[in-house]
Amino acid sequence: MAEDHATVREGLKLIINAQPDMEVVADAEDGRTAIELAQKLQPDVALMDISMPGLNGLKATAKLKDCCPEVHVLAVTRHKDDGYLQQVLKAGASGYVLKQSPPAELLHAIRAVANGGKYLDPTLAGKVMGRYSGRRSVINEGGTDVSDREVEVLRLVAWGHSNKEIASRLDLSVKTIEVHKANAMKKLGMASRIDIVRYAVLQGWLQDT
């Protein structure tokens, strides 16, 4: 767990350690220490604050996924701006939960990402869907079908993977991935990556299933 505020850190530890199936194996007050501890202990889940001194949570998440790809990162933050969500997914996090949410939400998020799922705080999900709802009629009235491959590419983009990573994962060329993404975005009236994330929320791609 990486959190620079001691009081919040201790509170999170109390909540998590009270669960029969969870244990905080280490805590850190900055991203650099969190990476060092994760390399040593290899936890199932790393809770990562975004705003921290030195190495912030976004950079720490990216570095952690590079050195410890098996560790699932859950961003625990007070930031409600969906722009942060986009950055966290791009960095490799599996979930995003707000500090303002009830403890039960945090615990649900931890279990979701520990099992290999994706998780998005319902408060943020509602906000993102609200912003996107004005474009839903445009998408639904388009009349054009998005292919299974295009959906697969969009899903991976929403989860934060780069075109190169998606190409490697699907055994396709980067150019082909770019074409699939461009075609899907055109069919769905999307203009940016955040539009893809918003659409992913509507489709339930980022929620634990």
Image (cartoon, rainbow, N blue to C red):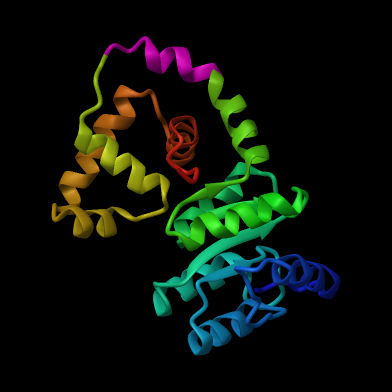
Q: Is residue 140 above or below residue 86?
A: above
| Residue projecting furthest to the right | 7
Q: Is residue 97 magenta?
A: no
Q: Is residue 67 above or below residue 174?
A: below
Q: Is residue 137 left or right of residue 99?
A: left
For the C terminus, the quadrant is: top left
The residue lying toward the viewer, choosing from 203 and 23, is 23
Give the overall secondary structure of the magenta segment.
Answer: helix
| Quadrant position of residue 55 | bottom right
The residue under the point 24% across, 20% down is 145
The residue under the point 47% across, 44% down is 206
Q: Is residue 154 left or right of residue 133?
A: left
Q: Is residue 165 above or below residue 196?
A: below
Residue 39 pos. (x, y %) = 49, 86
For the N terminus, the quadrant is: bottom right
The residue under the point 41% across, 50% down is 159
Residue 9 pos. (x, y %) = 77, 72
Span of residues in magenta:
134-143
